[in-house]
Each structure stands twice: as C-alpha cells, then as structure tokens.
Amino acid sequence: TRAGENPAVRVLFYRLCHLLTLPIIPIFVFDGPDRPKVKRGVNKFIDTFGFFWYTAAGEAEANLTELNRRNLIDAIISEDNDNLVFGARCVIRMRNVKEAGDQVTIFNSESIKTNPRVSLSRKALFFMAILCGGDYDKITRLLAQSELAKSLFIAASKSTSRAGLKEFLCDWRRKFRTLLAHDPQNMLGRKYPSLVKNVTDSFPSIDLILQYAQPLTSWTMDRIPNTSSWQLRQPRLTEIAMLCEKFFSWGSSRDIVSRFKKTLWQGIAIRQLLQLPEPDRRVALYASDTRVSEGLLTNIHVLRICQARLGPGSRSTHPDVNGYTIQISTHGVLHDTALGLDATLHSLTLESDCTKISFWIPSSILRAALPNLVRQFQGQNAVLPVVNYPSVLASSLELPEAGASVANPIIVDDEDEELAPATSPIIIDNELQDSEFVQGLSTGAGLGPIFLGHVNLCTPSPSP
C-alpha cells in the first residue's frame, strides 16, 4: 500500500514531530551540490513544520560547525564526529526517544579540552581523525597530544598552497617516523617500529588534512546564508496533513487522526504556547485594529492541568525535568487537520470521536504562557483576568468562527463542549480552582538546564 511508501520521509516526519515539542528553532543544513540529492518531500515537510533549511556549499557538517563557531546557532544535533574535528563548540546527540526520553549526550569543546580525563584540543581531534584506520589504536591519544600533531594542524590551517604543504610534510614525516621507532622523549612509553611502515610518502593525504583544516563552507564560497529570518515560526497543520495524505495516504487509510494524536498535536500546542504574547499584551493585541498575523494563535483549547510530574517520558527513562500533564480539546486541531483534505476525508476526520488529548509540558513553558493557570493549580491566590472584556472587542475585531485556524484565542476553562464567545479572547474559568487535580511530586531542583541561546532545552546538564 502507499501507506508503506517513502519510509525515509516517514522517519523524518516523526523526528520533526519530536523537535516540535522542544523550545528550539531547528535549522537543517544539507550537503552541497556534489553530494547525494535530498529525497523528494523532505524540504516541504521541514518548511511546513515551521523550521528552516538551506544547502551548504560543501559538507553540511563543516557549515554547521561554522554557524556554531560564529554563534549563529547554539548547538549542533548530529551523530557525525567530524563536527568536533571541524571545531564545533557544542554537539548534541539524541538518543532513542522511547528508551531515553529527552536525555541527550552533550559534547562541549571546552570541556573536552579542559577535562583531565580527556584533554583533547581541536588540534588533537584533528590528528586523531588523520590517524583513523591506521592501526594506532593503543597510542592514538598520546600521538594526538604530541607537538607533531600541533605542528601539522597549524601548517595545514595556514597553508596557502599545496606545494608549500607538500614541502612541510617531507620533514614532518621524518620526525614522525623517529617518534614511532625510537620514542626519544619516552612520550609513548615504548617503541613502535612496526608502525613506521604505515608512514608512507603519501601519508597523510594532503586532500584529507585540508578537508579538516580548511573545509569548504558557505563563507569560503561567499554564499553566506541569510540568518535574519531564523525566528520562531508556527507549523502549518493543514499543509502537514495534506503532505501526509500525499506521501503516506494516512487520510485515505483513516489513520491520520490516530497518528497525529500520538505524534503531532502535542507539538502544535506547545509551539502555540511558546509564541503567546505577554499576558498584559493579549487583550490589547486583540482589541487593536491590526489583524493578528496568520498562524499566531491557533484554536488551542486548554482544559486543565491534570498533575505535576517529572518528565518527559515514563519512569523507566528517569525523567528529571519539572513539568505538568495538561489536557487540551482537539476541536481546533481536528478542524485544521481536515481543512485541506478532500470532502470525503474532511468529513471522516471531523467525525472522529477524539475530543481531547493529554500530554506533558515543561513547567517553564506553561508558567510563561499561562501563569495564572499554574498559580491556580498550585493553590495560590492569583489575580484572574477580567472574564468579560469591553464590547469594543466585538466591533473592532473580525474573529473567525469557532474552530477556524486564523487568530483564534487560546481558551482555558473546565469544559470542552462549548467554545467561549468571541468577546472573551483569553479566559481562565474561576471554577478551575475547585477542580480535582492529581498533585504529583517534582524533585528536579538544582539541575541546571541547557540553554540554546535564549531557549531552554529543558535537559539537565550531564556531570563532567
């Protein structure tokens, strides 16, 4: 069936859904024109999720590193070791989400350099990459910390001609052979004459050392990417549903609601909460004559906070981030999911019996978006916003009908059967404080989060 087609694009879809739940702005960089082409549909999915992408002049890893070194991005999510060799400052490796929740492995270049258990500078990492596959396993680290490793990196980095580098390598090889055969300063602890044969007149490859020391990037090719637009954007749910029908036939197979419920709608809600205006600006925003830009506030109907708990994931993943399980109505997301499908699929989607979903959200995000709701849940006295705003709202705003995707308010109350009237854009129901919530225990105090610029990834820093 078509539902089983495009497996690579489906893997990307699930990865994008996971990234959508994190308060980060992902930038995808693809290899340059001489590398394998990007699979059909990949760029479209990235764009409709509200993320950014561009094609590098050379290797994507080198361009990501340059972005990181210039502080244009805060971290690199990659499984490739070359990023650190190129000089990246922070590399994140994401584990299996089902097994590890949001636990990630973070490689910081400064820690790698200063930690006495590692003590590897970029020059050392560069030389380790050069030695890779050369039977130096037992002494690779010692060789990487030698003066020969440093001199090779400096020469390769500053070289302006292949001829000059070739001349330098003649003398460098002689010294390297002497180090292996005689270990004159007892740096290696013993002699390794059998390894001398590996140091041929073509070692190391000039192409290889220039690839690592002077990689081809968008900056060296004067094709600098425009980073000014790299800001938080809202995903376009209707277009995502249309792409999923086109590539996976999820609408035709009636799977789209169940799949989106498990993978996508949580991220849609979190993104909307991330971009809410400050509480004291919300009424003024809706009362102004300026129309709210399309996609700023989708119809996300927050029903209640169910419990406070550590997350994300189950206890088996050892969650350690303070957060809440919240419940939202699916009325708005169902509407936007069905909006671009054909008439038959549109009807089938809207007839779904899925009326609400619950999911975990970091406390930092919920407090920033709906502070009064959190205070109510915690049993503190909160100053609630006025429920009935001046009637000028009705005349000055042309709010769409309930369920539409443009500029609908975020509503917080205790019932999902009835949407609030258009004259009450932001509502927190007084009855919420009387609802029965399950108060869980959150014990994540003292765990410092990892910050991607001004964005909190909500992941505790690993021990050095």
Image: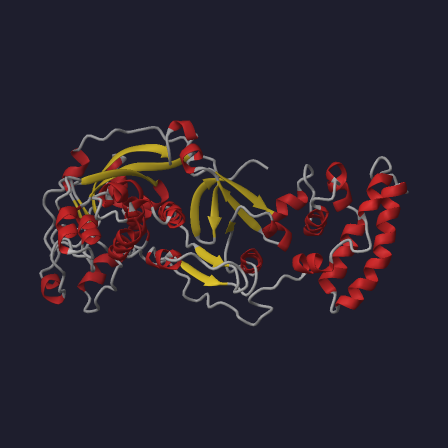
Q: Nearer the viewer, residue 255 or 438?
A: 255
Q: Nearer the viewer, residue 114 or 242?
A: 242
Q: Is residue 304 above or below residue 80?
A: above
Q: Position of residue 18 (x, y in %)?
A: 38, 45
Left or right: 250 as drawn, with respect to 63? left
Left or right: 443 as drawn, with respect to 342? right
Left or right: 53 as drawn, with respect to 396? right
Residue in the image at 76% along x and 39% along y: 139
Q: Nearer the viewer, residue 125 or 55?
A: 55
Q: Position of residue 287 (x, y in %)?
A: 18, 63
Q: Is residue 11 above or below residue 317?
A: below
Residue in the image at 76% along x and 54% along y: 204
- Image quarter (top left, top right, bottom left or bottom right) of the N terminus: top left
Say if residue 259 shows up in the picture.
yes
- Image quarter (top left, top right, bottom left or bottom right) of the C terminus: top right
Report the residue that reaches farthest toward the bottom.
222
Q: Is residue 317 above or below residue 337?
A: above
Q: Position of residue 244 (x, y in %)?
A: 29, 51
Q: How is the image coloured?
A: secondary structure
Residue in the image at 10% along x and 53% along y: 421
Determine the image quadrant of residue 354: top left
Q: Position of residue 16 (x, y in %)?
A: 38, 49
